[in-house]
Image (cartoon, rainbow, N blue to C red):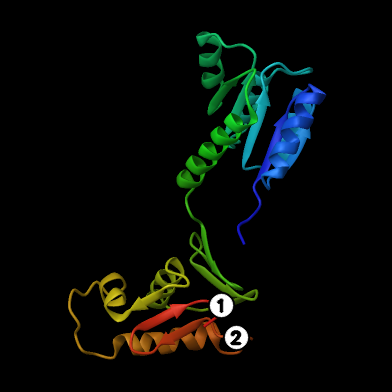
Amino acid sequence: MPMTRRILLVEDDPATAEYLLNGLRQEGFTAEHAANGPDGLYLATTSKFDAIVMDRMLPGMDGLSVIKALRAANVATPIIILSSLSHLDERVKGLRAGSDDYLTKPFGYSELSARLANLLRRSAAATPETALECGDLSFDLIARRVTRAGTKLDLLPRELKLLEYFLRHKNRVVTRTMLLEEVWDYRFDPHTNVIDTHISRLRKKIDEGFDKPLLHTVRGTGYRLAEET
C-alpha cells in the first residue's frame, strides 16, 4: 500500500485550522497542526513532512520568517502560503521567501486540495530515488548495498545491475530480449546461456534460505520479480 503523506498545517485561527485538518484527514493525509510560528518552525525542522500549509500572519513569528528560517536550515519541504494579502507584491514576497505556492483567502478547500496534489506530484518527480524494494528485499542505490530481511547480500557488479533492472520492473514480466538489451547491452541474441547462468546465481543469493522466493520464471516468456507468483 502507498505510504500515507504527512502534512503540517501552521494556522492560528482555530476554526480555519479545524476545517482544514478535517479536510486533509478525510483525504487520507496524516495532518499535524501548529498554532504559531515558533511551533511550526520546530515541527518542520524536527519531523519529516511531505508538504507544509503555512498561514502568512502568525503569532510569535510570521509565516515568511518561518519559511526563510526553514530554507536557511536546508529544509526543502514544499510549502503553500495561505494569506489574506492578495496584492501582487505580497505574492512575490511569499515566493521569494521560499514558498512553492501562494493561495489567497478566502478559498475553497477543493482549491487547496488541488494545489497540494500538484505540489506533491512535482516534489515526487524531483526527488531522486535512493532505494528500491520488493517485500523484505531492499537495494540501497547510493551505497549499492542489498539486504533481505536485514541480512546483507554480497552481489557482483553484474548481479547488482540485473537485480536493479528487476526491481525497477517489479511485478512485471521481463523477457530475455529486455535483459540482453538493458543489462548486457546486446542488440541481438548471442545464443549463449549467459542469462540463465546469472539468473541462477542471483536467485540463489536473494532467495535461498528465505521464507519465500521473489524471483520467478515465467515459462516460455521470461522472469518476474514479485512477492507472489
**Residue shown at 37% from the left, 85% from the top:** 198
Residue to which mark 2 is pinned: 212
**Residue shown at 61% from the left, 11% from the top:** 85
From the viewer's perspective, tell me whether residue 151 is left or right of residue 221.
right
Q: Position of residue 203 (x, y in %)?
A: 47, 86
Quarter location, residue 61: top right
| Residue 158 visible, this orientation | yes
Mark 1 vs mark 2: which is more N-terminal?
A: 2
For this rendering, which residue is in front, 30 or 210? 30
Q: Is residue 17 above or below residue 57?
A: below
Quarter location, residue 47: top right
From the viewer's perspective, tell me whether residue 185 is left or right of residue 196.
left
Q: Position of residue 140 (x, y in %)?
A: 53, 64
**Residue shown at 39% from the left, 76% from the top:** 173
Q: How many marks?
A: 2
Residue to which mark 1 is pinned: 227
Q: Is residue 183 above or below residue 70?
A: below
Q: Position of residue 20 (x, y in %)?
A: 72, 32
Q: Secondary structure at mark 2?
A: loop
Callouts 1 and 2 close, C-beta under 8 Å: yes
**Residue shown at 24% from the left, 90% from the top:** 192
Q: Is residue 196 above or below residue 35?
A: below
Amino acid on which disc 1 is placed: Glu
Amino acid on which disc 2 is placed: Lys
Quarter location, residue 210: bottom right
Q: Is residue 73 above or below residue 178?
A: above
For the residues marked 1 and 2, what is the alpha-carbon distance in whole angstroms?
8 Å
| Number of the label disc, if any, that sits on residue 156 | none
For this rendering, which residue is in front, 102 or 164? 102
The N terminus sits in image quarter = bottom right
Q: Position of residue 43 (x, y in %)?
A: 74, 36
